[in-house]
Amino acid sequence: MQLSLPEFHVRGDCMTAAWKRRLFIASFVWPTLILFLVFTVYPVLRGLHYSLFDWSGSAESMDYIGLRNFKDMASDPVIAKAIRNDYFLVFSKIFGIMLLAVFFAVALTRLKLRGSKFYRFAFFFPNVMSVVVIGVLWRFIYNPKLGILNGLLSETQGKPVETPWLGDSSYALLALLPPAIWAGVGFFMILLIAGIKGIPEPLYESAQIDGARQWKQFWHITVPLVWEQIKVSIVLIMLTSLNGSFAIVSVMTEGGPDNATQVLGYYLYQMGFKQYHMGYASAIGIVILVLSLVTTIMLQRIMKRDSVELS
Amino acid sequence: MLKRKASLTATALMLLMSGVLAACGGGDNNKENASTPTSGTSKNGAAETAQLKGDFEIQYFVGGYGDAWWKSMIAGFKELHPDLNIKESAGPKINDQMKPRWIKNDPPDLVYIDGAGGLDVGQAVKDGQLMDLTEWFASAENVDGEKLSDVVITQPSAIEGKLYTVPLVFGSWGTFYDKALFSKNGWEAPKDFDSFVTVSEKIKAAGIAPYIHPGVYTGYLIGGFLFPAMVSANGDDPSILQDVSDLKPGIFKSEPVMKAVGQLVTMRDKGLIDKAAVALNHTDSQMQFLQHKDAFIPNGLWLPNEMAKDTPEGFEFGYIPSISQAPGGKYVANPYTSPMAIASKAKNPEAAKAFIQYIFTKKAAIEWAEKTGALMNLKVDLDSSKASEVSKGAIKFYSSDNLIVAPAVPIQADVNKEMENATLALTDNKIQADEWAERMEKIAEKVRSQK
């Protein structure tokens, strides 16, 4: 008995230490986890729950209808159109933003431009503006009779141009791209600049000595070493586009004309709050969630490369 | 549709106007005054009607019309029923604030539906939130002993044959033009569709686009042109709008509706509709109209007020209720209204009914016109009142023999949206009239099957 006592003590101390450690970790994990559960997981589950009901969103009465909202979506032509539009925006934005962001980032770091601080500020500027302001601004630019774009076109072509950029179903969606890309470039440019600045200068110097020109340096040094940032940027653009196209569509076209610029996010809002189908809107929300997840995983797979690490 | 669109646009106007009011330094109307029970129990005992007791809660949106009229009405009602504890749930954000209570089935007794986020009457009826007022309204009298159904300008609109609302604010859609511009150019204001087409072609020849509308909110074109056109095409019988509201099978392929749509096609094919319209919202289109880029615009009677700050010197608003009638035909006024309704779960429905009976009087209507500059849905002579000249002119107008006041019918939200989409596509030559009818019948069928 007497022998076992110290052993017990030792074990007790061990447990206290382990518990202390656990408590220490928990004190960091739990607050965030609780916030995450309350503000992310719970609403998602609630949305999933509502998606199984026929509910107007403005009354107590809810009818359980199982998966009918999802079945209805399959035969709703607007859903198919919205998904197509969403992915058109996603891929066009990835292409447009990455092209410009990479170009500007390289130009402002590697190409020793004068006034690079000014350009950095100028390109980043749209990021501090609200999407609403951007949308309203571009509505003015696109205005068929009073807008600056048609004004310039009229000047250069010598005849009045009154193209209703946002009103013609053939090119309204295309017209959403310039503001969306313009608004997005700055942030990713900064992200890439940070990445490029982290690349040790001697790498470039030795490449220079070996006779590699800017173009080769870009492909063989810059791109592999900022690949992580590029990957993150692409996934972020995809996510913000799938979940955030609502804002620009809402301000600029409200999904029109005749659903030509409809995206899932705006259609969710329209169904839930303007047409009183909150259950259906929740089902759309679930689809957005699933699409975001699937697309993220696919993009991650496609962009997988052997990581290059600086030692 | 009209009601909803009207309330949406009215909201826009109200926000604008309340902004103006606030900018003027007053801003009293915008003060948050939700849930302030009216206190004071002065016992003058002068009331001859049956005394009402208990709590009575009224929800009203405070926007461009302010709340002075409401305060005055509630004070008067309180004097009549000193034992009634009146609770006002009011303010510019009241619709959002009260929404949870409507969802939880704990609504106020009486609601004035207006402003952003306000109840959608059709949906609220479907959800069983509003009280059936059919029987009551048929015999209800105001405190002056006049039958309500006799004194109102526009009758309450029916949903499946039943009445759930009483329109309080009244105005109408129509077509606007600049009188000064027309007289300068020797153009005549159209009296019917033929003269509209004739003068529009002259206008076009003079280098001005004849007709602009906000394509982003096609409801303006539908309210200001298409619906009156349906009534004209139906031999001036406004019951067609009730049929549209009820989604009678085949109604969108019926002759009057197709004739009205055909008039739109005529306007399109003759190039009378400004090509820019598809891309514009209401403000854009109104600015173009004010800048004489376009001659006509479909809009509501709020337009001169809404654009007061941007109206150029010498611009004279002219208003035509409808331009779709055949030569010699009557004008059709397609109204927009903001209604009052009683909750089906009202705890004090008697007080709610009594309050409606108290406010639908000539005295209250005059006070409304004087305090808000708009019209209340009540036939009244404003000549000797302090109401604005616009209000005085408008109220006379509605009692003219040459004018039909159509009912303000609710259009189900899905049908409304599809009608906006299809009508815009039609005016932009993306679809033709038969496809329009096909699409409308399809959505109507879908909505009917969901009932």
Image: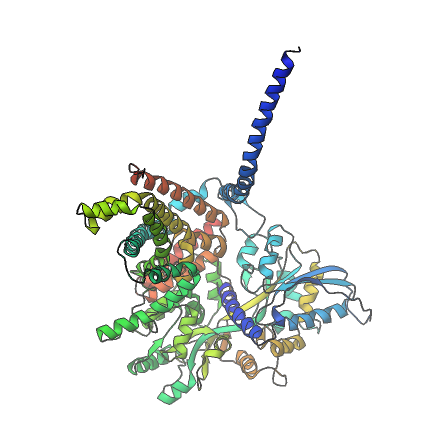
Mark yes or no: residue B160 visible.
Answer: no
At 52% across and 69% down in the image, what residue appears?
Answer: B10
* Location of residue B115 (image quadrant): bottom right
> Closer to the camera, B255 or A282?
A282
Tell me where residue A214 appears, x and y as whole percent: 21, 51
> Closer to the camera, A211 or B256?
A211
Q: Position of A20 compared to A303: left or right?
A: right
Q: Position of B396 compared to A236: left or right?
A: right
Number of marks? 0
**In the image, is residue B326 above or below residue B182?**
above
Tell me where residue A265 appears, x and y as whole percent: 42, 52
Mark yes or no: residue B91 visible.
Answer: yes
Q: Residue furthest left?
A: A211
**In the image, is residue A214 above or below residue A19?**
below
Tell me where residue B380 appears, x and y as whole percent: 61, 79
At 48% across and 75% down in the image, what residue appears?
Answer: B303
**In the image, is residue A158 above or below residue A84?**
below
**In the image, is residue B179 above or below residue A30?**
below
Q: How is the image coloured?
A: rainbow
> Closer to the camera, B310 or A125?
A125
Tell me where residue A270 appears, x and y as whole percent: 45, 55
* Location of residue B21 (image quadrant): bottom right
